[in-house]
Image (cartoon, helix red, strand yellow):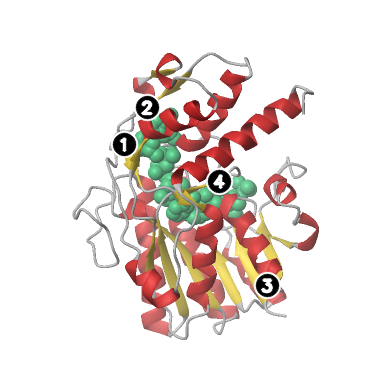
Amino acid sequence: MPTALITGITGQDGAYLSQLLLSKGYRVVGLLRRSASSDVVGERLRWLGVIEEVEFADGNMADLSSLIRVVQACRPDEVYNLAAQSFVAASWQQPLLTGSITGLGAANMLEAVRIARPEARFYQASSSEMFGKRQQALQNERTPFYPRSPYAIAKLYAHWMTVNYRESFGLHASSGILFNHESPLRGIEFVTRRITDAAARIKLGLAREIPLGNLEAQRDWGHARDYVQAMWLMLQQTAPDDYVVATGQTRSVRDVCRFAFGHVGLDYREHVTTDPQLLRPAEVDTLTGDAAKARDALGWESRIGFEELLAEMVEADLARHRQALGRG
Ligand code: NDP
Ligand code: GDR
């Protein structure tokens, strides 16, 4: 039975990746940082019904010695480095923390692998945010980067460290440049989930409006369940490499509003307001990924479309709020 170590196991992707790897017969070990609210940190794993099947190991991305100890103890065959301060907007408020966890944290994990388990295969959660200010209509592995936030800059450092450790030390280290992917387990601060949660609350009479920032921003949105498959496929290849993972379809925040509210029979224009406080100091206006390499080399493709994704998210938020109201 192969062993996978996942950092960021309590996040959206960590939960879906755990479910996938368990279904393939892996032993799954997740890095868990100490929290005063440890009773709620496993909520996503619980929602997917896999919390009893994963093992947890104490550690923090900021603490190299903890990472070395975890790697020594669990002896992973595959390491998936998903942990990060992942909210772009927060990275202007906490740029140094973002740099130390999202950037240097990845270097810590690479060092732990290099020191304690160099034969392990390594996955780095890179991001389309590294493309930032658009240099080409479609972004692929050869597109120049132009990061637009402290988060994207930290991810770029982690990405190049991954490439460098592959080239310097021969680590089987791959970087997945993933475009936005969402699900019912998406953090509530991200725009799709803010909108699907608001549509559900407004439909149930729990709220009347939702303030948003830039409605014209465009993203290439896929489903997290599809995207964790690509992570796993990258580590099954003989040679490590970098891959763009995307749907190739771009929609605006306004489209998300239109569809999510429309799904519950509401007109978003009666409920969505705009708040300049939610605009970003430097915006990423539009991103569209070209995942041809992942399709050709990995046989990967995005299956769940935009409307199916949002319908699942709205239905899950309706169910959550109905349950909280005792109408479940
Ligand atoms: P989440 O924000 O849902 O999860 C982040 C995870 O990192 C959580 O498990 C969190 O733990 C953990 N973490 C944060 N700080 C530390 C720390 N100091 N030590 C240990 N663990 C820590 O992110 P997603 O699941 O959405 O994304 C996974 C990864 O992929 C991230 O690196 C993200 O930047 C990247 N990415 C995501 C994309 C997306 O669209 N979702 C697209 C491209 C890249 P805790 O629960 O304790 O907070
Ligand atoms: P993003 O996702 O920054 O692309 O990063 P987010 O959902 O936060 O923003 C997407 C776009 O929507 C605009 N927007 C708003 N965003 C939020 N959060 N809240 C709002 O009210 C709002 N109104 C408009 C934003 O300005 C932006 O243009 C996500 C994260 O998962 C990263 O970790 C990951 O690397 C990238 O996706 C790919």
Q: Judging from the image, what secondary structure is the residue with disc 4 in?
A: loop
- Amino acid type at circle 4 is Ser
The residue depicted at 31 percent of the width and 36 percent of the height is 217
Q: Earlier in the sequence, mark 4 or mark 1?
A: 4
Q: Which one is nearer the viewer's eye here, 124 or 239? A: 239
Which is more foreground, mark 4 or mark 2?
4
- Amino acid type at circle 1 is Ala
**Disc 4 + disc 3, Cβ < 8 Å:** no
Crowding at dot 4, Cα within 10 Å, few <14 / some 14-19 / many 20+, comes out as many
**Disc 1 + disc 2, Cβ < 8 Å:** yes
Q: Specify whether 200 is left or right of 39.
A: left
Q: Judging from the image, what secondary structure is the residue with disc 2 in?
A: loop
Q: Earlier in the sequence, mark 4 or mark 3?
A: 3
Q: Specify whether 39 is left or right of 188.
A: right
Residue 200 spot, x, y in % from top left: 59, 26
Q: Earlier in the sequence, mark 4 or mark 2?
A: 4
Give the quarter of the figure containing the C terminus: top right
Residue 190 in view: no
Which residue was labeled with disc 3?
24
Mark seen at residue 217: 1
Residue 123 in view: yes
Which is more foreground, mark 1 or mark 2?
1
Crowding at dot 2, Cα within 10 Å, few <14 / some 14-19 / many 20+, comes out as some
Q: Earlier in the sequence, mark 1 or mark 3?
A: 3
Residue 286 spot, x, y in % from top left: 28, 44
Is the C-beta of the residue carrying label 2 under 8 Å from the nearest atom of ligand 2?
Answer: yes
- Amino acid type at circle 2 is Gly
Q: Judging from the image, what secondary structure is the residue with disc 1 in?
A: loop
- How many labels sit on residues? 4
Which residue was labeled with disc 2?
213
Which residue was labeled with disc 4?
183
- Amino acid type at circle 3 is Lys
